[in-house]
Amino acid sequence: MQKLQAIVLAAGKSIRFKTGKSKLLERICGQEMITYPIKVLSQLNIDITTVVGYEKEKIQEILQTASNTYIQFITQEKQLGTGHALKCTKQLWNKEYILVLNGDIPLITKDIIKKLYDKHIETKAAISFVIAHNPDPSMKSYGRIVKTQNTIQIVEARHFSGDTHEHCCINAGIYIISKDFLLKSIDDIEENRSVKEFYLTDLIKIASDHNKTISTLSAPFDRIRGVNTHEELWAVEQIQRSDLVRYWMERGVRFSVAQNVHVDLDITIGSGTYIGCGIHLLKGTTIGSNCIVEEFTSLESVILGNNVRVKPFCVIKNSIIENDTVVGPFAHIKENTTIGQASIIGNFVEVTRSTIGANTKAKHLTYIGDATIGNNVNIGAGTIFCNHNGTTKNKTVVKDGSYIGSNNTLLAPITVEKNAFTAAGSVITNTVPENALAIARNRQINKEGYAQKLREKYTHESQSDKKDSLSFTGAKKTNLKNSAAY
C-alpha cells in the first residue's frame, strides 16, 4: 500500500451532538474517538494527513500524544463541508491513490481498508467507496446510495426523502480516489445552496456522469457505524465493549454479567480471573491470573498481582496491589500506593501515597496517608495517620513487626520502630523505640457508686424537661383560644 496516502476529516463542529465540543474528543472505552481510525492507518503504515478546524488544538494534542506516527495537519478555517475539507489538502496529494475517511468511524478495521484498496486497484476505478446495507428508517445520519439505469450517486441524509427499504445501501464515508481523477474533478464540486457546503459525495455523481469506473465494497454495518448523536455513540461503545469482553473471555477470563461491565481498550487481564457485575476496568489497568474482582469496583491505572481478591465497592487508582492480597469491601486506594504481598486492606480503609509491606493488616475504619509501613504490621481499627498540618504533608514510618492499637492517632512526622506496640486510644506524637510500648492517654479513674448518682441526676433532668414541654404546650393552646376570641 505504498501508493496510498490517507486524509482524515476531523474539522466539523458536531452540531448534532449538542454539547458545544467536537464529538471526536468523546471517549470510547477509554480512548478518544479520533484515535481509532488513526491507529488503524498507523498499523497499515499509511501516510496520514488530518484536516482539523473546530477545537483543532485539542485534536492535534490528542493525536500527537496517542500515535507514534507522524501526522500532518491542515486547517480548514471555515467549515464549508467535506468537499472543501478535501480540497484544503490539495498541495499534499503526493501518492497515486488518496484514501479519504471521516474521523467518526471508530470501528473501522484494517481488513476493510485493505479490501477496498485491492478492489480499487483490481477494477482500475476512478473512485471506490464502502457501503453497508441497513433499511432501518431510524438510521437518519447516513447518506443513501441512489442508482438509476445510467447513474449512481450518494444523497446526503439531510436531503434524502425516498424509501429506505428501496434504497437500503448507505454510505460509510470511506473512499479511495485515484489522484488523476481527483485533480480533474475537485473543482467541479458545486456548493449546495441550501446548506452552503461542498459535499465530497458529489464526486460519485461526477464520476458517474463522466462514465468513470466506480467500485463499491460492502462491509458489515457495525464496522462502519458513524457517530453523530449520543445514541449512536452509545451503540458504538456497546459494540466495542462487547468485542473487548469476548476477547478476554477467549483468554480464560470469567465475566459474571458480561453486559454490565465497563472495559477500556488498554487493559490486561490474566487467565482464571473472575470479574463481577458493575466493574469498571479503566485505562492502564493490569490484572494478574486467578484474581477475583467483586461487584461495583473501579480500577484505574492499577496493577493487581496474581491471586488478588478485591471485594465489592472498592475504588483503586494509580496503585500496585501485590500477589495474594485482599482489599475491601469499601476500600479506597489511590495516588501511587503499593500494597505488599499477602496483606489485607479491609472495609472503609483509605490509603493514599503510601507503601505497605507484606503480611500487613489494616482491616477496619482506617486512614493511611503519606506512610511507609513495613512487613507483618497490624494497624488497629479506627487508626488515623495525621499527615497534614494545615500547610504541608508529612511522613509516618511504621517499621516491621509493629502493632498499632485501635483508635490511635499518629501525628506526622513520626517513626514507630521495629516490633513496637502502641496502646489503644493513644495519640502518638514522638518516635516509639524498638520493642517499646507507647501509651499516650489519660489514666482511667474509677469512682465507686457514682453510676447511681448519674442515673438519678439524668432521671430528674429528663422529668423536668417533660414538665417544661407540657407547660409550653398548654400556654400555646391558651394563646390560640384567646386569639380565636378576637
Image (tube, helix red, strand yellow):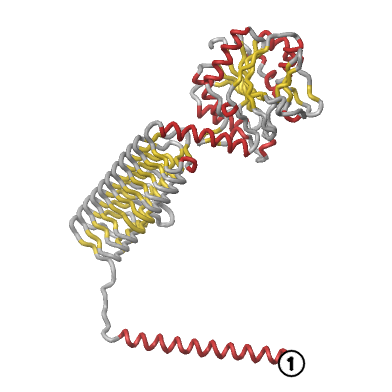
> Is residue 350 in sight in this rendering?
yes
Residue 287 position within the rendered picture, expressed as x and y whole percent measured from the top left = 37, 38
Q: Residue furthest right?
A: 193
55 displayed left or right of 68: right
Q: Badge 1 is on which residue? A: 485
- Find residue 266 and report its image quarter: top left
Q: Position of residue 140 (x, y in %)?
A: 70, 32
Percent x, y for residue 141?
68, 31
Q: Residue at x 44, y 41 (%)?
A: 300
Secondary structure at badge 1 equals: helix
Residue 78 shows up from this direction = no
The count of marks equals: 1
How packed mark 1 is, by other alpha carbons closer than 10 Å (few <14, some 14-19, many 20 or more), is few
Looking at this view, is 278 or 17 the one in front? 278
Looking at the image, residue 318 sits to the left or right of residue 101; the answer is left
For residue 178, what is the image quadrant?
Answer: top right
Q: Amino acid at mark 1?
A: Ala
Find residue 33 and report its horizontal and vertical position in percent: 57, 32
Residue drawn at x 44%, y 46% is 277
